[in-house]
Image (tube, coloured by chain):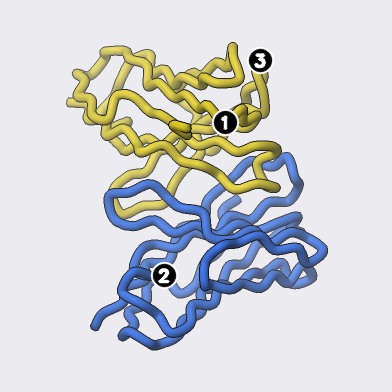
């Protein structure tokens, strides 16, 4: 059982480049979400999904797109990377609704935008 | 809206106790607590649900006062392994966004 898998672990982009951070879970979890964490700060919710085909915005959605075509996958897209998006990104999932079951986290992606 | 956590930081010697508090301005359905060690992902500690149900697996206890919209995390006889940042995650409904609090940095020293 792999749990929540994030790829890549590290990524360096130039300003204006686009990329997709991948997140996959093999636990049949309905709820999936993306967070970013800046140095010395807490986690801020970017986007979340309560099931395939359903997504919604979190606290800091600007500059990011998501889609949920399958239960397993929840990719995060940066359309035009900016230095302000330099951060550690975590994907998380839970079995049912967001607040009734614990979140399982991926190991994170360290993203640097130059 | 983010919850308020206190204290922001605390330093303990091994064996000492600590309490971390979390409060919200809105009526709560549940509260989660997570711990994050440096360079790692957050790890689940505890869920406290409205009505008194608790779900947790570590030797750390917590309380949830629904009327006061507050939760407290109790760490007793602290160990070096307790060091990290503790996050409170309150929710107004079961389908709510999972918004993390600002965190409390806890350092346990020998």
Say left or right for B57 vs B48.
Answer: left
Asked if badges 3 and 2 are on one and the same chain, I answer no
Asked if badges 2 and 1 are on one and the same chain, I answer no
Sequence-wise, which precedes: disc 3 or disc 1? 1
Q: Which chain is yellow?
A: A
Residue at mark 2 to residue at mark 1: CA–CA distance: 35 Å
Q: Is residue A63 visible?
A: no
Asked if badges 3 and 1 are on one and the same chain, I answer yes
Residue contact between numbered discs 3 and 1, judged by CB atoms under 8 Å:
no
Q: Which residue is mark 2?
A: B8
Q: Which residue is mark 3?
A: A53
Q: Which residue is mark 1?
A: A27
Q: Nearer the viewer, mark 2 or mark 1?
A: 1
At a point 61% along the width and 20% down the height, the residue shown is A71
User: Outermost residue, front direction?
Assistant: A1
Q: Residues within 10 Å of mark 2 (few under 14, many from 20)?
A: some
Mark 3 belongs to chain = A
At a point 51% along the width and 54% down the height, the residue shown is B44
């Amino acid at each position: 059982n792999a749990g929540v898998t994030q790829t890549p672990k590290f990524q360096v982009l130039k300003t204006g480049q686009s990329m997709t951070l991948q997140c996959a879970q093999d636990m049949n979890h309905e709820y999936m979400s993306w967070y970013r964490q800046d140095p010395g700060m807490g986690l801020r919710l970017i986007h979340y999904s309560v099931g395939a085909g359903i997504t919604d915005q979190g606290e800091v959605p600007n500059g990011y797109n998501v889609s949920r075509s399958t239960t397993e996958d929840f990719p995060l897209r940066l359309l035009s990377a900016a230095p302000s998006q330099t951060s550690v990104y975590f994907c998380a999932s839970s079995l049912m609704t967001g607040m009734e079951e614990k979140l399982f986290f991926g190991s994170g992606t360290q993203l640097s935008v130059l | 809206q983010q919850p308020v956590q206190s204290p922001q930081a605390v330093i303990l010697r091994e064996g000492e106790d600590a309490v971390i508090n979390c409060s919200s301005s809105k009526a709560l359905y549940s509260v989660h607590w997570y711990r994050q060690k440096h360079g790692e992902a957050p790890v689940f500690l505890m869920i406290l649900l409205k009505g008194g149900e608790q779900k947790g697996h570590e030797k750390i206890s917590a309380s949830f006062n629904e009327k006061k919209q507050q939760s407290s995390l109790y760490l007793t006889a602290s160990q070096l392994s307790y060091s990290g940042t503790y996050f409170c995650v309150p929710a107004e409904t079961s389908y709510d966004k999972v918004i993390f609090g600002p965190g409390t940095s806890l350092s346990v020293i020998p």
